[in-house]
Amino acid sequence: MTNANKGGRAVALAVWLLAAAVVMLAFSRRWLPALASDHGAGVDRMLHFTMLTAGILIVVCHGALGYMLWRFGGRERAGFRPVSERSQRRWSLAAAVFMALVAEGGVLAVGLPVWAQYFGSSAPANALTIEVTAEQFAWNVRYAGPDGVFGRTDPKFYTLDNPVGVDPADPRGRDDIVALNVLHAVAGRPVRIRLRAKDVVHSFFLPNFRVKQDAVPGMTIEFWFTPTREGRFELACAQLCGFGHYEMKGILIVQSPEEFRKWFEEQSRG
Ligand SMILES: [Cu+2]
């Protein structure tokens, strides 16, 4: 074996090892946080499909690359066989069609129904509406109170005690429940989030629920999801929003209907 061939085979082994390491890493642990929402299973399916197709491509391409190095690495002169333009075009097209149909088409086929379910529909009538107003570096949470109607807000009423600017003259706002960094919801009952931001772009991220939505100043963005089990779950800001970004952490407490009602009544009594 020539020295050049030894070198080629060493690189081939390295390429194969790299592919094997990637596959082992992918299967070494559960990468996704425990699931706690209805539509999240569809998001996970989409992620797994993408990982699987990309993984197969990685294994096949590294396998072929390693084989070429192993087999032909020792040759001192590379051979060059000109191919016709037609054959070049044919093989480029074959790769493009394969990628478009199998990889992208698959992602669309698996992903579009999830998107339609999540963003393409409005929340069911029994949904619990929670207004979340992001600011540097906290989550202001508001519930409509016993009357079921949110009071009017205006930035000119912003104070430390009135962080979302509820209009004191509006009777509908007097029973609104305002909290900081803690959201309460009910297992099995859809949640409609009305997301706003006071200063910069933030991102409302509930990893266990596979929910992530940017909060944009000047916009009220609505979306919904259904928690499937009780527990305390992290709410994180997923948009680098300033020096205190790392501490912009909240919590979503999913409760039984009785526990939630108790909490809600306590808050309403003020
Ligand atoms: Cu933020």
Image (cartoon, grey):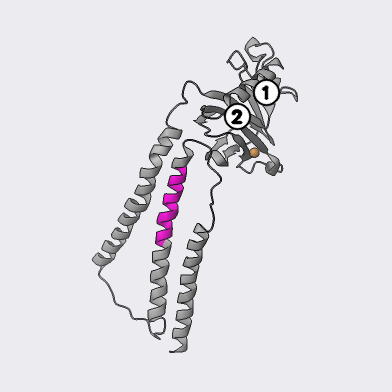
Residue numbers of the magenta segment: 43-57
The Cα–Cα distance between marks 1 and 2, rounded to whole angstroms, is 18 Å
In this orientation, which residue lies closer to the viewer: 16 or 239?
16
Q: Residues within 10 Å of mark 1 (few under 14, many from 20)?
A: many
Q: What x and y, as percent, mark residue 3? A: 47, 88
Check if residue 47 falls in the magenta segment.
yes
Depth check: give the residue in front, 151 or 147: 147
Residue 255, labelled with which disc? 2
Residue underneath mark 1: 178
Assess whether mark 2 and mark 1 are in contact (beta carbons under 8 angstroms): no
**Crowd band around label 2 with a 10 angstrom C-alpha radius: few (<14), some (14–19), many (20+):** many
Q: Main secondary structure of the magenta part?
A: helix
| Residue 121, image x, y percentages | 43, 29
Q: Is residue 261 visible?
A: yes
Quadrant location of the C terminus in the rendered image: top right
Query: Is 78 or 65 nearer to us in this picture?
Result: 65
